[in-house]
Amino acid sequence: MKTIMNNLGAGSAGRRLVACLQGLGLCLLGCFSAITQASTVVQLALGGTPESVAYSRLLLEQTFASDGHSLVVHERGNLPMTRLELMLQRGDISVLILGPTAERDRRFLPVRVDMTDNLVNQRILFIPKGSQALYDPVRSLEDFRRLQRVAGVGAAWADRTIWEANDLLVEAVDGDWKRLYRMVASPTRPIDYLPRGAHEMAREWMQHAELEVERNLVFRYAQDHILYVSPAYPELHRLLQELLPKAQRSGLIRRLAREHYRQVFEPPVSLQQRRVIRLEMATPL
């Protein structure tokens, strides 16, 4: 088993890539056209919540393994999304699973494969304690609009434009979005609920006893999250453009998402038992 750096060969393209990668201190996927029979060790830098990094690692490990590569992950920490996106743009992290937007398409290299088997684009609400009765009568998007409740989201979230496109009130916060939990819990803040992906809610409800999980509704839109690759690593992007569609067609992504996030089908999330409120996308991508 050799690392990618040892498999680049003596060609000029290989020498240029080695110089670039040595400067970054990472041997990130390079010049796969020069790799023939030998398997490779792929080294990637990942950042985000422990849960998101764990899922990304699991999925990418098995995706690369299907093509004969092994994976080594360097974790960069649980940082605010705006900082993670800057790191992705610079090449300080290699890939990031994100909601697709036109701006992200300009800044990064997208791989248009659904990465969570449509679990992330099913949103469940954190609400203040004692407010469930307000949501009980809701049967449709129009019913929900009439409540005039304000969603709190991170400034970099794709949810912001989706909520606005559906004429729903939304307040975006810059910096560390995690303060939204406290803002929803506080009666003095102008934020009434926090939408979270079903897979996120399955873990987070236990961590936020100051909030309630809304019991009946799930807000669903058509676009799953996709993988964005740093523009610093076009060869990595080309490889993932080849491997991730295969992982989707083989059922690998669906199987891993359902296994890793199996708690979405258990209380209090119980995704399959919820009333679906469908949201339109802001702009089809």
Image (cartoon, helix red, strand yellow):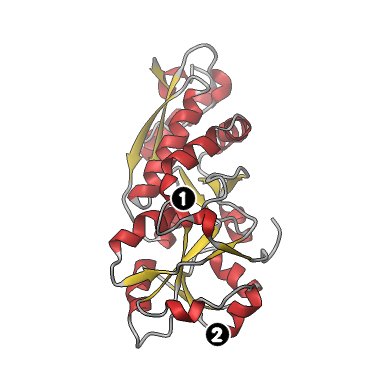
Q: Which element carries disc 2, helix, strand or loop?
A: loop
Inter-mark Cα distance, 1 to 2: 29 Å
* Quarter occupied by the C terminus: bottom right
Picture layout, residue 80 above or below residue 250 = below
Point out which mark residue 153 bears: none
The answer to whether 192 is drawn above or below residue 119 in the figure is below
Q: Position of residue 231 (x, y in %)?
A: 54, 45
Q: Residue at x 40, y 55 (%)?
A: 202
Residue 70 visible to the viewer: yes
Q: Are marks 1 and 2 in contact (CB under 8 Å)?
A: no
Q: Which residue is disc 1 drawn over?
A: 265
Helix, strand or loop at mark 1 = helix
Q: Position of residue 1 (x, y in %)?
A: 39, 14
Q: Is residue 236 visible?
A: no
Q: Residue at x 38, y 38 (%)?
A: 23
What percent of the width, then of the height, locates residue 28?
Answer: 44, 33
Left-right relation of 210 to 99: left
Which sits in the foreground, 165 or 93? Answer: 165
Dot 2 amino acid type: Gln
- Residue under pointer 2: 148
